[in-house]
Every structure is written in C-alpha cells, then in structure tokens.
Amino acid sequence: MFIHSLLRRSISLTIIIVCFFLVPVAYADTSQVITFGADLNSEQKTLVARKFGVNLQDTAIPLIEVTNAEERRYLQGLVPNKVIGSRAISSAMVEVLPAGSGVTVETHNITWVTTDMFENAVVTAKVKDARIIAAAPFPVSGTAALTGIFKAFETATGQKLDEESKKTANEELVRTGELGEAIGKEKATELMLKVKERVIADKVTDPEQIKQIIINVAGDLNINLTPAQIDQITQLMQKISKLDLNIRDISSQLQDLKTKLDDVVAQNEEVKSILQQILDALNGLIEKIRAWFGL
C-alpha cells in the first residue's frame, strides 16, 4: 500500500514537472528595448510605438523612459537651452543583432539629424550590431535622441557605455549638424567619417597633425572650411582620438553608411558625366554653326 502511494506521488510529481516545461512562458525580449521620452502621454506613446511596429497592448518588449535631465546632461553647453527644451520627447527602439551585422538607423519625425549622422555618432560611443529606430509623435530636431538610444542599448545588452564616449558622440552629432547647415548634411557626415577614420587608423593625437588631416580630407572632397570650422573639428577629433576606438570596428559597423555615401558619389559622378555629354554636344553644335556662317 505504501509503495503504491509512493508510486502515485512520484508519477504526479513527474507529470507536474513535465507540464511546467511544456507550458509556454512569456519572457521579456531583452534583445529589443524601447525608450520613451518621459513627457509623452499615453496616446503619444502608442503613436510612437506604431512607428516601431509595436502594439503596446500586446508586447513583452521592455519599456523604459528617458528624462529631459538625462538629455541635458549630454547636451548642456553644446546647444542652446531653447534647443534642449524642457520636455523629453524623442524616443527610440534598439534591437541587438548578431555579431557582424553592423549598425543601421531609421527615423520618423526627426527633422534635423539624419540617419547617417546618427549612425556615425553611435559608433563613436561603441554601439555595435544594432537596428535603431528614432522617432517622435510630431516633428522634432532629434538632437536629444542619442540619450534614449544609448539607454536602450545599455538595457538590451546589459553593458554600460563609457560616459566620455557618450558625451563625445553627442558633440559629434551636434558639430556635424552645424557643419551640415553650411555645406550640406551628406558632405558634413562624409567629412567627419573620413577624418575620424584617418585619426583612429593612424592613432593621431597631435592637434596640428589632426588639423592637416582635416584640410587634406576637405580638399579631397572639394569642401571649403573656415578656420573656425577647422578648429572646431580639430577639438572634436582630439577627444575622439582618446576613446580607444578600433578602425576595424568602425569600418565593419558602418557598412550601411559607407554604402550610402558611395551611392551618392556614384550618382554625382553619373550626373557630372551626363552634364559633360550635354556640354560636349552643345560645343559641337556651336562649332558647326560657326562653320556654316564662316565665323
């Protein structure tokens, strides 16, 4: 009798254990994390989440907030207070990808910062192998979005990014945007990337050598910089040179950005080729007209 009772208990325990492992358990997907601006209301959060392709009523993705005070910590002194504002609006979703995937960025309602600028800046902070979406419920500049991106990446990976790297990345984003207002965002991003790559690859720390790299790269890209712009970029690159960045990591993480820049160059060359053909045809026509009239 005792043995039968023991067997029944053992069988029941076994069934319970088996059922425990067979029943689906909902775990939070920490490979994806969403950061909302803390001053968004519930309706705005729902709207932004749709930009991420997420239904807030049915998601296991961790949701965290970023405050204006956190944004201000990295932007204070880089942009005027009125640009930082008093509310945290910009939001982000970060999805950690398999090693070697690189970094890609998509934006919605971000008006001042381009996807290329984001990609270039986040890699300076050593964000890697991530799909990033930055968004807002209405048009915003996007200058504060990096704070939420970094916070989401840290939460998703469980690894803290270096504070100095995050500050420098924010400065790089702002300086690129300011330069872009003078020479165009694409040219500014390409200039910053190429200068950064040379500084890191050659381990240059001397300000005069950095300045010469900037002048050389600007010349290669047919970009005219003012002395003030050169000095500002030099100061930024001095900070970047101290971040222990690896040129192989930079290159591998920015394949998406490099491809886009190469496409722009190719398109420009194609346009130049077409324009040259038109000019050659016009010159040929003019020569024929001169010949007809004996000019």
Image (tube, rainbow, N blue to C red):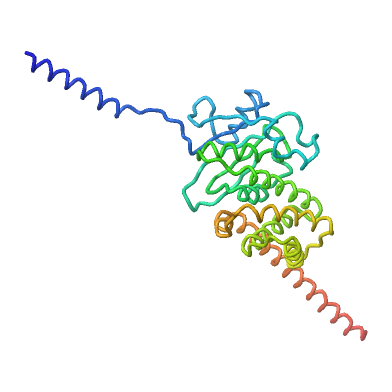
Q: Quadrant of residue 2?
A: top left
Residue at 63 percent of width and 47 percent of height: 165
Give residue 209's position: percent from left, percent from top.
73, 65
Q: On the rendered structure, is 70 left or right of 14?
A: right
Number of numbered callouts drawn:
0
Front residue (pair 246, 58): 246
Q: Quadrant of the N terminus?
A: top left
Q: On the rendered structure, is 291 left or right of 37?
A: right
Q: Quadrant of residue 106?
A: top right
Give residue 137's position: percent from left, percent from top.
67, 32
Give residue 21's position: percent from left, percent from top.
29, 29
Give residue 5's position: percent from left, percent from top.
12, 15
Residue at 68 percent of width and 26 percent of height: 39
Q: Quadrant of the C terminus?
A: bottom right
Front residue (pair 108, 71): 71
Residue at 87 percent of width and 80 percent of height: 289
Residue at 63 percent of width and 50 percent of height: 124
As drawn, which residue projects farthest toward the left? 1
As drawn, which residue projects farthest toward the top? 1
